[in-house]
Image: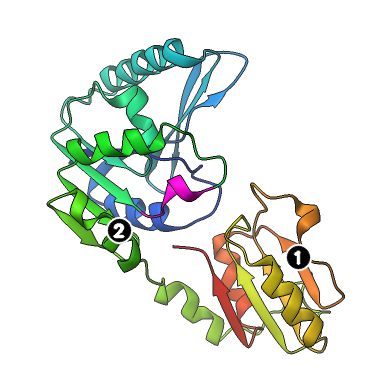
Amino acid sequence: MQNILCFSHLSWNFVYQRPQHLLSRFARNNNVYYFEEPRHGDRDELTVSSQDGISIVQISITHEGDERNLKLRKMIDRLLKQQSVKHFSCWYYTPMALEYTGHLEPDVVIYDSMDELSAFRFAPPQLIELENELFKKADVVFTGGHTLYQAKKNRHHNSHPFPSSIDKKHFEAARYNEIEPEDQKNIPHPRFGFYGVIDERFDIELLKEVSAKRPDWHFVIIGPVVKIDVNDLPRAENIHYLGSKKYDELPVYISHWIWHWSFLH
């Protein structure tokens, strides 16, 4: 079995999306280590847990700047030695991880550019420079869609559009479900739904305008609110925020909507 080290800006348990779909499939025939973005904490600590057949690596670090990156390198090196991982591929979702993984010598480097991270709110200023470095290191680059591919195709000789799709088997269950979730059963019909991350990409003004023009339509919003103020979200009797739901629960909800859209990959 091959070893795959994935370095991501996303927590494994945040929202089940593109990384989870791909890596859980890779884990059927490979040893996959998923490194979440290191977090500032009260002590330096690296923990490994197993989920979906994948080793989830969480790191807490007290240091900042160059000292932080040096400490992270040592922690990762120690883990690889403990796990007897000598040959491996590196799969990157964030160029920021190069700050503490640039010393590694993988057999293959893959950059899966699923979003234009530099356009996100609070994007680190060094992200663009590190992405340029990642393009130089990468053996292959995938993009999360054709638009992103057009923007990046000339930056690497081996770039490929890899649009996200749907989990047909998973969501097909919505066609046959008759169970109504408790927090949704009293919401009138017709219902229009959204599931995904509610962040700066969420069209607040559109939801506000449509809900005002069609008070007889009800909008069900599912997902965590990040990087925007929850108080900026539109409020109305026909807008219903149900918070985060597990991936397995989504078909139960959407089976009672007449139309839905999402930001999940």
The residue under label 1 is which amino acid type?
A: Tyr
User: Does the magenta segment cover residue 100?
Assistant: no
Figure coloring: rainbow
Name the residue furthest top: 67
- Spatial CA distance of label 1 from label 2 is 34 Å
Q: Residue at x 41, y 75 (%)?
A: 169
Q: Quadrant of the N terminus?
A: top left
- In the image, 92: left or right of 196? left
Q: Residue at x 74, y 78 (%)?
A: 209
Magenta span = 114-120
User: From the viewer's perspective, is residue 212 above or below residue 129?
Assistant: below
In the rendered structure, which disc, 1 or 2, sits on the residue that comes first in sequence? 2
User: From the viewer's perspective, is residue 124 above or below residue 102?
Assistant: below
- Residue 176 rendering spot, x and y as whole percentages: 55, 86
Q: Residue at x 56, y 48 (%)?
A: 14
> Which mark's residue is nearer the viewer, 1 or 2?
2
| Mark number, residue 260 | none
Mark 2 crowdedness (10 Å alpha carbons): few <14, some 14-19, many ≥20: few
- In the image, 207: left or right of 117? right
Q: Which residue is mark 1?
A: 241
SS label for mark 1: strand
- Residue 186 rendering spot, x and y as whole percentages: 84, 79
| Mark number, residue 151 | 2
- Residue 29 rendering spot, x and y as whole percentages: 22, 49
- In the image, 230: left or right of 101? right
